[in-house]
């Protein structure tokens, strides 16, 4: 059964989550939790879910960008976002390095814990993540484009940061308005309409 997703305002989303030991990771409790988080993420649906989002202050996140999530996205849009399917996997106690330094990729981003809203968030285009997998084994992930954005978003959750902390404030919009007005617009046009007094950073 999917777990309830905590919404913005709950203090668990603002705390730095604690790391898990190897024995904890391999325990039946954490293995069951991973299964529950996968089901909750898919039910939402979402492309990632961090443990704080279900009320547990643990450095654990699950990620998956299924092919069917991209079926209704135009090929040119997928190419612009550098988005392709990502198989289900787990990151535990992750350390992230932004490979491109200053955030350079800007696009709308939503969050299951800020239900009903999206906003433009700047992210690094490339990242390196060193973490443990669901078995407690080390993994090294080099990601670019949309996958890099997902990793940054989920790892932020493990340190008490939400996408709304990093957003350009004037770009906050409901999901309905995003779909109706901005979903297929280039970013310079979005920016000109929502923040016309300031040049695109």
Image (tube, rainbow, N blue to C red):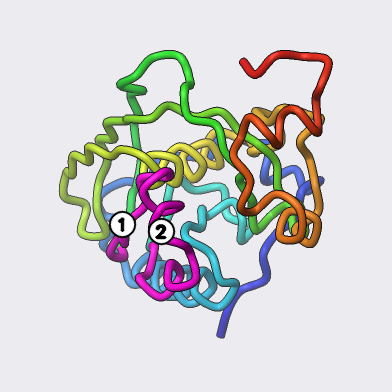
Q: Label 2 neighbourhood size at 10 Å, few (<14), some (14-19), many (20+)?
A: many
Give the x, y percent position of residue 2. Answer: 58, 79
Magenta residue check for 72: yes
Give the x, y percent position of residue 7. Answer: 75, 55
Magenta residue check for 49: no
Residue 185 or residue 165, whichever sits in front: 185
- Residue placed at 78% from the left, 40% from the top? 172
Q: Check contact, mark 2 vs mark 1: CB within 8 A.
A: no
Rendering quarter of residue 5: bottom right
On-image quarter of the C terminus: top right
Give the x, y percent position of residue 195. Answer: 80, 25
Q: Which residue range is magenta in the image?
A: 65-88
Identify the residue position indicated by label 2 in the image.
Answer: 62
On-image quarter of the N terminus: bottom right
Nearer to us: label 2 or label 1: 2
Indicate which disc, 2 or 1, sits on the residue closer to the N terminus: 1
Q: CA distance from mark 2 to mark 1?
A: 13 Å
Left of 109 or right of it: where is 73?
left
Which secondary structure, mark 1? helix
Instruction: Establish if 121 lies above or below 62.
Output: above
- Residue placed at 18% from the left, 44% from the top? 139
Label number found at residue 25: 1
- Residue placed at 73% from the left, 54% from the top? 178
Instruction: Establish if 32 lies above or below 15.
Output: below
Residue 181 or residue 122, whichever sits in front: 181
Rendering quarter of residue 120: top right
Which secondary structure, mark 2? strand
Q: Label 1 neighbourhood size at 10 Å, few (<14), some (14-19), many (20+)?
A: many
- Residue placed at 68% from the left, 46% from the top? 12
Instruction: Establish if 50 lies above or below 153.
Output: below
């Amino acid at each position: 059964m999917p777990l309830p997703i905590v919404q913005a305002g709950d203090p668990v989303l603002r705390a730095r989550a604690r790391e898990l030991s190897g024995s904890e990771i391999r325990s039946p409790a954490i293995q069951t939790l991973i299964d529950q988080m996968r089901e909750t993420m898919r039910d939402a649906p979402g492309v990632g879910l961090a443990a704080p989002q279900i009320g547990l202050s643990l450095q654990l996140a699950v990620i998956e960008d299924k092919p069917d999530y991209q079926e209704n996205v135009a090929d040119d849009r997928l190419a612009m976002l550098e988005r392709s399917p990502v198989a289900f996997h787990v990151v535990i106690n992750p350390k992230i390095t932004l490979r491109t330094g200053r955030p350079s990729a800007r696009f709308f981003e939503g969050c299951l814990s800020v239900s009903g809203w999206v906003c433009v968030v700047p992210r690094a285009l490339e990242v390196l993540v060193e973490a443990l997998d669901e078995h407690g084994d080390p993994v090294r992930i080099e990601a670019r484009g949309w996958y890099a954005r997902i990793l940054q978003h989920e790892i932020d959750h493990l340190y008490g940061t939400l996408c709304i902390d990093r957003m350009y404030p004037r770009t906050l919009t409901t999901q309905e308005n995003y779909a109706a007005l901005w979903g297929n617009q280039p970013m310079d046009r979005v920016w000109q309409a929502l923040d016309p007094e300031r040049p695109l950073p």
